[in-house]
Amino acid sequence: MSPLRFLTAGESHGRGLVGILEGIPAGLALEAAFINAQLERRQGGHGRGGRMKIEKDEAEIVSGVRRGKTLGSPISLLVWNRDWKNWSEAMRVEPGGDEKLKSVKVPRPGHADYVGGVKYGHSDLRNVLERASARETAMRVAVGSVARKFLLEFGVHVASRVVSIGAAEDDADAEKTPVERLNEAADASPVRCLGKKAEREMVAAIDAAKAAGDTVGGVFEVRTSGLPVGLGSYAQWDRRLEGELAKALLSLNAIKGVELGDGFAAAKRPGSQVHDELFWSKDKTHAVRKTNRSGGIDGGITTGETLVLRAAMKPISTLMKPLRSINIETKEEVAAHVERSDYCAVPAAAVIGESLVALVLADAFLAKFGGDSIQEVRAHYESSRRR
């Protein structure tokens, strides 16, 4: 069983989102303000829709923390939906009321609407889209922020940037920006990229999609520094760290592809241009690399180099100029359902990706250096470093 596990619950227009995170050791300094700063970052980015003008996501720590320190028991979090006041009747929990209120009979191509309705036997697709919505990721950012705080205790920094939106690509060299300063640089841009020319092109691509009633996707990159050698394992297929990282990122709404290091580009090159050569450090105590094409993992195990992951996000399924679809009740062929939505959420997805990566890495860190308190984990970590 993994040392760290979490659950989330809640619907997009329900009363709120709930999260439970189990496995964080006792003694970690934690305040809601730290979590809320990450929730605020998730709400930003050019191309977001009207929902973000309503919500002001703030987490309440309900349990697992006393006087600013974790207790070692499960941490439970709440994020209330401000929009609930407008949906309290349509999303009522108790029986009764108008069942046709806000009901959905027409699925959106590319969304979970139709397949979810078939799977769970729902005749009102509202029952699907409320949970399938990316609104749920607010809670994943909240629980991931706790994992981020744990990693920071050991000098591990997780950050992200947007690599491309549509055909607009950022050719800025992220290697020149230390990971601990990367978010500061990316957050200064409305699309979270590093290059100013690329920023203008990305904003233009989003504006063009919006004007056309369309949406646009892109690619983001998550970078992590300060990781020790040895997280993950080659010993069994489900212990290879890149597998867990890919699973976490692919679990994010609209993500269709994940790569590590040079990823798909490496498949086009000879091995001599792909693998990272090894050299001795000056004191000949450990190996060093002059390149990081592997992205920080060899054979399922961290190398100690910067972990570099990229994820490809498809365009959002809700189009203001909808595609063709079907009415599951009348059997007519009609225009797809239109739900309030974003035009581009790649900048926000990058922030969410940070939290998902943090959760996986915190779990792997605890698997190797585990303990019931921060002091115990630190002792194990320092002992391993000395060895």
Image (cartoon, helix red, strand yellow):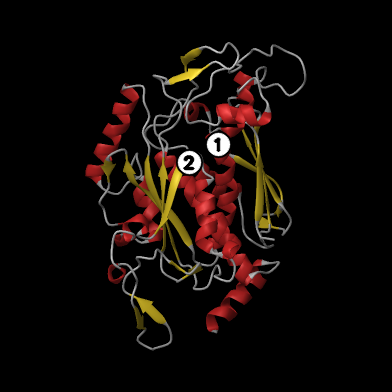
Q: In the visual, does 36 lie left or right of 370?
A: left
**Image spot of residue 374 (x, y percent):** 64, 67
**Image spot of residue 343 (x, y percent):** 39, 29
Q: Residue furthest right?
A: 95
Q: At x 36% / y 48%, what residue is drawn?
A: 186
Circle 1: element type = loop
Q: How many C-alpha atoms fall within 10 Å of the one at disc 2: few (<14), some, or many (≥20)?
A: many
Dividing the picture into quadrants, the one containing residue 91 is: top right
Residue 356 showing in the rendered view: no
Residue 43 showing in the rendered view: yes
Q: Quadrant of the C terminus?
A: bottom right
Q: From the viewer's perspective, is residue 241 above or below residue 258? A: below
CB contact under 8 Å: marks 2 and 1: yes
Q: Quadrant of the N terminus?
A: bottom right
Q: In the visual, does 328 lie left or right of 286?
A: right
Circle 2: element type = helix
Residue hosting label 1: 57
Amino acid at the residue labelled 1: Asp
Q: Residue furthest left?
A: 197
Residue hosting label 2: 42
**Image spot of residue 299 (x, y percent):** 48, 69
Between residue 186 and residue 224, name the one nearer to us.
224
Q: How many C-alpha atoms fall within 10 Å of the one at disc 1: few (<14), some, or many (≥20)?
A: many
